[in-house]
Amino acid sequence: MKNVIEQKAFSMADELCKIRRELHKIPEIEFDTFKTSAFIKNKLDEYEIPYETVMETGIVAQINGKCEGKSVLLRADIDALPINEDSGVEFASEHAGMMHACGHDIHAACLLGAARILYDMRDELRGTVKCVFQPAEEGNGGALPMIEKGIMENPHVDGAFALHAEPLEEVGNIQIKDGSVMASPDDFEIVIKGVGGHGAVPEKCVNPVTAGAMIIDAYKNIDIKSNNPYVVTICTFNAGTCRNVVPDTAVLTGTARSLDNETRFALRDRLIELAETTAQKIGASAEFRFNQLFPPVVNDGNMNKIVVGSAKKLESVKKVVTLEKASMTGDDFSYFSERVPGAYFKLGVGNKAIGACYPLHSPKFKADERALPIGSAVLAQAAVDFLNE
Ligand SMILES: [Zn+2]
Ligand SMILES: [Zn+2]
């Protein structure tokens, strides 16, 4: 027997599917999610749920329960990626060069569903639910500026949940992991300065290309003491304009990812040290610019327990899969879960039979939409269980 929350979620299945498809047609990038935000606000108006606009395209819908209590935040990111869709679905992107390939259309639909369920239940609800629709998860991050606008205060938020679509997990399943779940996706640039000159007389030059190659080599064997995995990848190496001229400068860029802040900053310091000392070996200099992005996402044990308990109350959730390994990708949900206990879990949207088996960020990304009411139900149930705890 489905409980009340699950029944409400499944009665909205067609509506959620329509919402997801409408959003899928109008993907927008970074903070410029104007049509997306307008669509979400229209839905909130239709459901008569009050909301506030934060920073033009962010939205916070607040549901006040009849009794006083704690406050919980549910977050959906709503932005898309700058890639051309190649999924073949009939509701494909109408915006050239943009696509919901990370499933944020699914997140927005699931949260609209959860908001409606919780609003319907507000007379039995103890405490407050803040439903946050956040732009700019990909790229520069919309979570932090929204938090800086005060969305975690008045009332003060006590805990936060978010889900992410996972096409490599079967629809009906939920994935969760204790501790670190996602990495800090920091990146860096190294500007190497040498002395240019004629390629025929390298002994009169300090070749920054050589220094760059030496730094890449040194980074391969980087060794930080950590209980968690980390990764350093050089992704661009630019230098020179001509085959027989040694350039003055070379520029390397790359990404440095770790799963806890201690490793993260130890890694940063070691990268700086290695770049400088390695370049110096041949008389070059290296200027290291670290671009600190989102912190790692670290799940709280108790919040995870709530998600698992909530999922088990729902008959549409077939399996709760405990993940062993964290992902080295990032998510700016970490700004919420760094401030209050949080749980970030994955919603299976995979189904090989309908071609929903491509990874996130693939132009062929597809999802089994039967996951939508499940996502709404888990979010709503987790919110209720947290508030009643
Ligand atoms: Zn993504
Ligand atoms: Zn994403």
Image: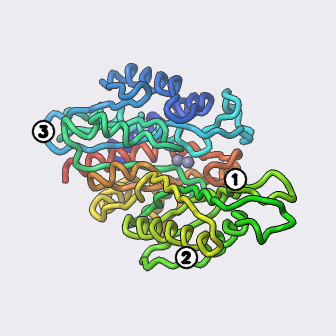
Instruction: Return the disc, 2 or 3, that comes first in the chain's sequence.
Output: 3
Residue 112, x across and y down, in percent? 42, 34
Q: Which secondary structure lies at badge 2? A: loop
Position of residue 277 relative to residue 303, above or below, is: below
Residue reaching furthest left? Answer: 68
Question: Mark 2 belongs to which amino acid?
Answer: Ile
- Badge 2 crowding class, 10 Å Cα cut-off, few under 14, some 14 to 19, many 20 or more, is few
- The residues bearing labels 2 and 1 have C-alpha atoms spaced at a distance of 43 Å
| Residue for point 66% across, 59% down | 235
- Side of 165 where 250 appears, left or right: right
Instruction: Return the disc, 3 or 1, that comes first in the chain's sequence.
Output: 3
| Residue for point 49% across, 32% down | 31
| Residue for point 50% across, 24% down | 34
Q: Which mark is residue 222?
A: 2
Q: Do the residues under discs 3 and 1 have CB atoms within 8 angstroms?
A: no
- The residues bearing labels 2 and 3 have C-alpha atoms spaced at a distance of 52 Å
| Quadrant containing the C terminus in the rendered view | bottom left
- Badge 1 crowding class, 10 Å Cα cut-off, few under 14, some 14 to 19, many 20 or more, is few
Quick check: is the Cβ at mark 2 less than 8 Å away from ligand 1? no
Question: Mark 3 belongs to which amino acid?
Answer: Glu
Residue 323, x across and y down, in percent? 47, 68
Residue under numbered circle 3: 68
Residue under numbered circle 1: 353
* Frontmost residue, 85 versus 111: 85
Q: Which secondary structure lies at badge 3? A: strand
Question: Mark 1 belongs to which amino acid?
Answer: Ala
Residue 58, x across and y down, in percent? 41, 31
